[in-house]
Image (tube, rainbow, N blue to C red):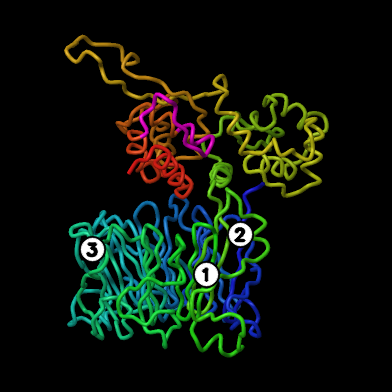
Amino acid sequence: MSNSSSLFVNGKGGFCFVTQENKDKFPNWTKSRIKKTQTIKKIVSSGGSRFLVWKKPNKLEFYHEEYKKKKKYQLPKNETIKDIASSCLTYLILSESGKVWSLADSNHYKVVPLLDADQSTFEKIRPVTFFEEKKLFVNSVAMSKFSGYYLCNGDQLYASGSNSHGNLGIGKNREEEAMPVYVQDKVTKIFAGNLASNFFFITSQPDLLYACGFNGDGELGFGYSIFEQYTPAAVQNFKGSDILTVSSSLFHSILITKNGQTFGCGKKIRNGLGVNKSIFTLIPQLKEKKAVQLATGVNQTLVLTDQNELYGWVKKELYLKNKPKKKNLEIPTKIKLPGSFTTYLDSKNMIRIACGSYSSFLYLDFKNTLYEDLRTLYESKKFCDCEIGTMGNQIPVHKNLIECRTKLTIDQIQNKLFGEKSINKEQTLSFLKWIYYDEISDLEKLEQTFNLLKLTYPPSVDNTLEKDIAQLYKDDDSKDFKILVKIDDEDEDNEEDEDEEENYEEIPVHKFILLARSGLFRAMFDYVNEKENTNKIQDYTNKSIESLKILIKYFYTNSIELADNEEPELIVDELSDAVEYYQLNDQCNFESELLKIKKQFELN
């Protein structure tokens, strides 16, 4: 199966939502008009019929029905998007380099730290230079109503924008801060919600959940009556380390713990939450479910379980308009997924959910990001080691991948495809899309190419990218690169100089696999290539060679397997930070594989 996704939207009016007649029958999904949904990484909505789609690695599309607009944006080529956040016609974009960018309606630029905002509406992405000037590296961003939050240099919290209800956590005497101001340190995670006037964050010392801002309906979960909280206060019944995520809106907040329990607070009469408490209370309808994702809007909430079951509930007034007889949508109710989702819900796919103020988003994403990783490698054209095509019209490619997928040599492919009856560039590109990520974009052209190469068409279920790459792991002869792992000397008293090669063990690997799967190795190759052209690179992580071998095998197979002589506790411990350290895209699948090892060997 190729790496494809679908996006469904439910909500009020808008460019790609359901019709007005159906808007209150939550949820009533309709397929969106967004093109190339297979590249969607995240969707955020700033209210109404406006939403921003992040397409990897650094492309953005803004949809706005009121202005009949679909605008495209892109960060500079040397920048890659890490995350996006939104609220009130304003968007914050965080890049991997720790820089912050903004996109906003001209009347709402006061939310972000820009003193010279253009008057045009959503004209361009603008860099927020404050953090660079202060030499602050931004790790994460979040937004509430007219306010922005920035976690910098690992644990330092800054905030900017409106403080009308105390949502910046800086005291009562300041109503607005145009430039980010320091709030406190030792902060590990930050959370906000669409159109909320409050804010949540977790600290490491002490290990607590804190909240500040508007509390008129008990949505901060304090359990006591206070209309506005101007300085952060602890939500006493939760440890920060136990929390997976928090999302807040106008009248309610929802919290999910790491063990999958769902808690809510706020007034039932205002938001149809299913609880009527000013302290976070376990939601009984989800007591036996393990929640893994959460999204809240002004009037709606979505929760996704580990079994890909979707639960939702909406404000009381909305569902009364249509007088439903069978379902009470004021409490969490299981939602029937669109047919396309049930078709593609396999080990590769997972559902992503998001909410705007009056709209909800549902789309498929791949747990197995091998396809996405290789698509990115194909589009970047970096570190290609050969070319195919006619003179003057060659296309750079990665030799080992081409030969792996076709079982032919590059010379054979070149002769058969670009001999006397040469295929054109369009046909070549169609062929390469199948090579890199199994996409069949033009059936006729791809069939012609397969016939010229004398390959079986259509490709069989045994000739998929996933299976070909897994098989390539066993092909030691074609591995063209080596990772050098330092081996501790057995005799520490031996002071004689030894050949450097004797102190290192080599792990053979295909270079294109490292480039596709790990951001760290891509950065290392960039550095090494400036110095010299080499087929070796040294690993400085101080991890055991056993752990690195398992990680490299995972790059090929998407699974973690331990041999009888390997220590599971050591492997789990050393690879627990691999997603972040090696900059892997497939966090969900990798952590799931580690969890299997923990359960298999009964590790804590």
Q: CA distance from mark 2 to mark 3?
A: 38 Å
User: Horizontal and vertical percent for residue 428?
Assistant: 72, 40
Q: Nearer the viewer, mark 1 or mark 3?
A: 1
**Spatial CA span between label 1 and label 2:** 23 Å
Q: Is residue 258 magenta?
A: no
Residue 37 is tagged as: 2
| Mark 2 Cα shell of 10 Å, populated few (<14), some (14-19), many (≥20) | some
The kind of residue on which mark 1 rests is Tyr
Q: CA distance from mark 1 to mark 3?
A: 28 Å
Image position of 57 with respect to 332: above or below: above
Viewed as shown, does residue 220 lie left or right of 393?
A: left
What residue do we see at 54% from left, 66% from top?
310
The residue that mark 1 highlights is 311
Question: Mark 1 and 2 residues: CB-CB less than 8 Å, in contact?
Answer: no
What residue is shown at x 40% (from left), y 31% (from top)? 548
Task: Pick the residue in front: 121 or 92.
Answer: 92
Point out residue 138 in the picture as x, y percentages from the top left corner: 31, 57
The residue under label 3 is which amino acid type?
Answer: Leu
Residue at position x 60%, y 64% in the image = 7
Q: Are marks 2 and 3 in contact (CB under 8 Å)?
A: no
Q: Which residue is mark 3?
A: 208
**Of marks 2 and 3, which one's residue comes earlier in the chain?**
2
Three-letter amino acid code at the position of disc 2: Thr
